[in-house]
Amino acid sequence: MSRMLLLSFIFFLTACSQSTITTDQSLTLEQSYEESEKQAQNTTVRMFMWGGDEGINSYMDQWVKPRLMNNYGINLERIPMDTNEILQKLMSEKKANKEEGTIDVIWINGENFKNAKEQDLLFGPFVEKLPNYSQFIDTESLESQFDFGTKIDGMEAPWGKVQFVFLYDSAKIEDPPSNFSELKEWIQKNPGKFTYPDAGDFTGNAFLRHLLYESIGGPEILLEEGYQESKVSNSTEFMWNYLNDIKPNLWRQGKTYPTTLSDLDRLYSQGEVWMTMGYNEARAESQINDGIFPKSTRSFVLDTGSIGNTHFLAIPFNSPNKVGALTTINFLLSPEAQLTKYESTYWGENLSLDPSRLSKADQSKLASINRGNSVLSPETLKKSLLPEVDAKYVEWIKENWLSEVVQTR
């Protein structure tokens, strides 16, 4: 064998070996994070995620993307897609035994994570490979161990925390409602100026879960007993009556509902409705700064509380660039990335990191950040915080809302 042919053969074997490392789960998990980060240089990472919030999109495109390129040579491609569609794509690839897909990182939590884990659609466990996870995350907290009641088992990394708030135009609403009774009264006095997204939408379903808690008597019962369809079926008369009572005074008399939060935001920005809502206590700031929402936008929570949760990042079983995915997720868990995300300039959501584990300099920076006039105080948010319950209730609400509300006259 000639020297040139021998060198070509060795190069071929090396290339095959490198390819195996980036696609084979066991080898990627066996090697050190440092090795993975080195191999991730000059690769493309395709991140599939919900794209319905311009502040979030700007954070990923304008801040995260150039830094991944500068720091690691990683080209980040953000692909907007709803999570249920992502899972459908992965399930089809799983059935077809497609070992190399097109998705490297997915934004996920709740029922989607539960379904993905049960269907073996995820790569891992990987979180303990990440230096920033080990250094800055409170790994003993329940929110790091469970996602809507599903054990995480290292299959996803906590990316951030959000809390549900209502947004309103303070130029049109002087005193926002403080409970569901006052909200109903306000809706009846201001017909057509309120609605909520379809129960199939993440935010719309969250609005309905608040009513479920109200109907049941709080989330504690649901947490203690786990998912029990008979329990909610026999205790939700208040919930369905409430929704049907407000229906005639909703936008378009409740004959149709916004399909997504983006649709509701559009109605609010155009002044057709005077309230919107969202699973991020600081989401209005970027919309205000971009001139989409009026400057008079403020937020409120009901006295009965507001649901908050943690959302995560995961890697599909057939990610073609697992080393790039590991590097990207580790960067997104860095104090620099988390503190920037906390600022209302882009996203404004809360950190997934434990503030006590930050450096003194980063703790000072965190304390100095002004999240904006539309954001409630940390004390108010903490006082009103309600936990999420089993993800099966999300699906239960989605199915029963159609028969109990949409299809009734």
Image (cartoon, rainbow, N blue to C red):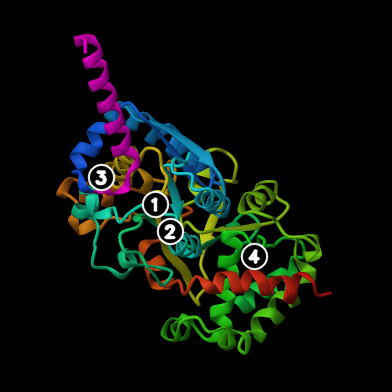
Q: Is residue 122 above or below residue 242?
A: above
Residue 21 lies in the magenta-colored region? yes
Q: Which residue is mark 1?
A: 314
Is residue 233 a member of the stretch shown in magenta?
Answer: no
Q: Amino acid at mark 2?
A: Asp
Quadrant where the image shows the N terminus? top left
Circle 3 crowding by C-alpha within 10 Å: few under 14, some 14–19, many from 20: few
In front: label 1 or label 2:
2
Residue at 45%, 71% in the rendered image: 388
Q: Which residues are magenta?
A: 1-29
The answer to whether 254 appears left or right of 145 in the picture is right
Labelled disc at residue 27: 3
- How packed mark 1 is, by other alpha carbons closer than 10 Å (few <14, some 14-19, many 20 or more), is many
- Secondary structure at badge 4 equals loop
Please give the residue where the numbered disc 4 appears in the rendered image.
Answer: 199
Q: In the picture, residue 260 is in which quadrant?
A: bottom right
Question: How many neighbours does mark 2 have within 10 angstroms: few (below 14), some (14-19), or many (20 or more)?
Answer: some
Furthest-right residue in this view:
409
**Measured Cα–Cα span from mark 3 to mark 2:** 18 Å
Mark positioned earlier in the residue sequence (2 or 4): 2
Residue 188 can be seen in this image: no
The x, y position of residue 223, in whole percent, is 43, 81
Q: Is residue 154 visible?
A: yes
* Amino acid, disc 3: Leu
Q: CA distance from mark 1 to mark 3?
A: 18 Å
Name the residue type under label 1.
Ala
In percent of width and height, residue 89 lies at 55, 48
Residue at 25% from the left image edge and 48% from the top image edge: 29
